[in-house]
Amino acid sequence: MTTARPAPQLTRSVLFLMCLATGLCAGGNYFNQPLLDEISEALGVSSSTAATSVTVAQVAYAVGLVFLAPLGDLFERRKLTVGLIGLTAAGQAIAGFGVFLIGVAVAGLFSVSAQVLVPYASILAAPGKGGRAVGTVMSGLLAGVLIARAVAGILSDIGGWTLIYHVAAVLMILVGIGLWRVLPPSYPEDPPSYPGLFLSMGRLILHHPRLRTRSLISGISFASMSAIFATTTLLLADEPFGLSPTAIGLVGLTGLAGALMASVAGGMVDRGHGRRGTMLGLVALALGWGAFVLGGHSVLWFCVGMVLTDVGVQLVHIISMNTVYTLDPQARARLNSVYMTMYFVGAAVGSAVGVWAWNAGHWVGVCVAGGVMTALCVLIWVYDVVLEKRQLAQDARLAH
């Protein structure tokens, strides 16, 4: 049995560095998206072949979520986090030196250090502040995902498509050193064996229906967003837009509004407004896809759609994540692993669906696919509300 250490206060400086680390790790999986044309030309492959790197990164991340992220309930979290960041840096360096798909896969696999840091923040946070702490760290992750595209495009114009991978590798090493210096050690209570982690994850899935519903809602909503990510370059680089990688990356920055909403969503959870926030998120997602229909002929409407869908996805995501953490506070890493695996499986599926929909019906096909996925989210959420009311009624009966 490993003795638990008292959780120290989560300071602003520690929280900032955790945000930076999650942003770098998660953002690295998206460097390739605005660079697909340059990568295909440099490596002598078709654009569709280069685009498979998007799915490779997401699938590798999902595999890491299953097999590596639960280790936060088994090993000391500071050592685990810094070690994973170092391996992520190695993957980015490999990709930058031309062994592209292998590097992307390695970086994607070990970048789940971001998902060790998120429940880590919840553990270190003061009582009643866990939702905001998780939302703040996730805002760094989400901002990193969006900024990564813009920075990748800018650096590609300056020094070629490999430059972003070299720069990212160096930055991750520096951030890893910083985290080692500022993060307090964190030891899990009564850690199970490694096989026991997966047995307990199965029990958590069976025992908590809201783990299933919340994971599905978030995974499908993120799938709809990933369909946009996978096809934005195909739309905006072609006529009538003809935008450069830098311009495409800057258009993607309009989604930063969603990253800013992450902390707000965490605060809503702390105040008990999770159901209302989820409803607002789904409404924003639906309106966003309506704007994307017009965005096929207008960059302005495309940007409106990006803002609305990202706000919607992040409201749903942060509220769902915090809801899942409350199901069993002693199993946060395992709950996070189940939840985030579904989330990024959704991303991989959404990327594939987006490319398929583009081939079948161009941008209109993508918008139809996004609308269908949004409708599925609404249906599952209605059932999740029923489950929530049942649980509240049961708790009230037990209280009396």
Image (tube, helix red, strand yellow):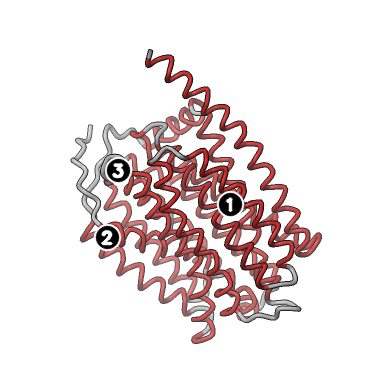
Q: How crowded is mark 3: few (under 14 residues within 10 Å), some or many (20 or more)?
A: many
The residue at which mark 3 appears reads as 123
Mark 3 vs mark 2: in front: 3
Residue at figure coordinates x 48%, y 69% from the top left: 147
Amino acid identity at mark 1: Phe
Residue at figure coordinates x 71%, y 61% from the top left: 355
Q: In this view, does 46 lie above or below 16?
A: below
Q: Is residue 399 above or below residue 247?
A: above
Asked which quadrant contains residue 110, the reply is bottom left
On the picture, is 240 further left or further right than 177? right
Give the secondary structure at mark 1.
Answer: helix
Give the secondary structure at mark 2.
Answer: helix
Residue 225 drawn at (x, y percent): 61, 56
Residue at figure coordinates x 46%, y 40% from the top left: 273
Q: Which comes before the other along the chain, label 3 or label 2?
A: 3
The residue at which mark 2 appears reads as 179
Residue 333 drawn at (x, y percent): 38, 41
Q: Is residue 266 above or below residue 295?
A: above
Q: Residues within 10 Å of mark 2 (few under 14, many from 20)?
A: many
Determine which of the numbered discs, if any, sits on residue 222 in the image.
1
Q: Which comes before the other along the chain, label 1 or label 2?
A: 2
Residue at figure coordinates x 47%, y 24% from the top left: 392
Q: How crowded is mark 1: few (under 14 residues within 10 Å), some or many (20 or more)?
A: many
Mark 1 vs mark 2: in front: 1
Amino acid identity at mark 3: Ile
Q: Label 3, label 2: how many angstroms apart (C-alpha)?
A: 16 Å
